[in-house]
Amino acid sequence: MVLGDRSPQDGDRRPAALTTAPRAVGVPLDDAHARSRTQQIAVLTDPDRLRLLSELAVDATQPLDDLAATSGLDIDIVHEHLDVLSRSGLIEPVPSTAGPRWRLTPEAIVRFGRLLVDTGPRNEPVRARSDHEPREETSPAVLPAAILRVVDQLAYRHDGSFSRETVAAYVAESYALLAEQAHITRHLPSLTSRFAQQRLEALATTTGLVLRGTPEVLFVCVQNAGRSQMAAALLRSLAGGAVHVRTAGSSPASSIDPDVVDALDEIGVPVAAEFPKPLTDEVVQAADVVITMGCGDACPIYPGRRYLDWPVEDPVGLGVEGVRAVRDDIAGRVTALVEELGVLSR
């Protein structure tokens, strides 16, 4: 997977657009949110508290003794710091029969998740799958004319953010990934354009080129044709622009299940414009919350994100009533997620 270009001057591999000023997406903070964040930032100016929060971002299963050992602090001091972090809304207790445990709140993950982990070589992300090997057919030189036009369009759109070489590499790989699952190739260029655009947007978020003021949620299921599409459509319907939503599949189908489209249409939730797409690293890295349904092992693990696994039945082959039951199950979970994220329903 291409994550950046190689500089001819120093040979470092780095994102092509780090010299470009970040572009903000969202609205300015109101007084209440500004005061809340100021309080939380003040709490995190203490290096020991910041380290403890970082430890919990990487592993929320650590007991008090382990946190004291890894931080080198007296256990009473650790307890005091945890109390301050809890009162500031940065951590919350986790029910456990083995003693007290704490985890980051959804708010803390969204606001500070990416700041809490070392991105150096000591903390390389744990990948649940290997990267795609370079393939001859993904070279821009052998792409069809229609896909080359997609490269031209996206290179123009992302001029100043990513080099043409980076855009071409993402378009080429996106085309190859979709071509593997496409039974009908007539719409492949337009789907390639949309898929590559979504991946480049995720890359811009990951590298700090776009600063979003809204939580990023990724839904992943096996085929990206049922459960994840339902969850994404329902979340968009409930939260609107207050949440940025993406979907992916560990083994995507060629199209969304028609029964899923019908079940959502019954309650006035559109999904027809979406399409199944493969899971790629940059969309996981861009997410604040990653929710899997039946494919948790396929998702790369990056510290600083919140991972949830929803035990939702696969709607494939369940019939109309079965699909409706799955829809209603997911709707309840999405409503609870909206409340946890602190975003208002429309």
Image (tube, rainbow, N blue to C red):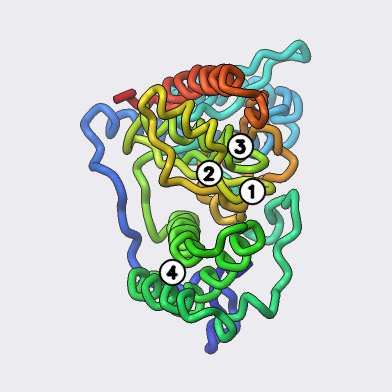
Image location (x, y in percent) of residue 111:
43, 38
Image location (x, y in percent) of residue 55:
65, 37
The residue that label 2 is drawn on is: 247
Q: Residue 297 lies in what quarter of the image? A: top right
Q: Nearer the viewer, residue 24 or 166?
A: 166
- Disc 3 vs disc 1: Cβ atoms closer than 8 Å? no
The residue that label 1 is drawn on is: 252
Q: CA distance from mark 2 to mark 3?
A: 23 Å
Q: Which badge, 4 or 3, comes first in the chain's sequence?
A: 4
Left or right, residue 14 beside residue 33: right
Q: Which badge, 2 or 4, comes first in the chain's sequence?
A: 4
Residue visible at 31% across and 50% down in the picture: 25
Helix, strand or loop at label 1? It is: loop
The residue that label 4 is drawn on is: 18
The residue carrying pointer 4 sits among few (fewer than 14), some (14 to 19) or many (20 or more) residues within 10 Å by Cα, namely: some
The residue that label 3 is drawn on is: 57
Amino acid type shown at disc 1 = Pro
Amino acid type shown at disc 3 = Ala
Image location (x, y in percent) of residue 151:
44, 75
Q: Which badge, 4 or 1, comes first in the chain's sequence?
A: 4
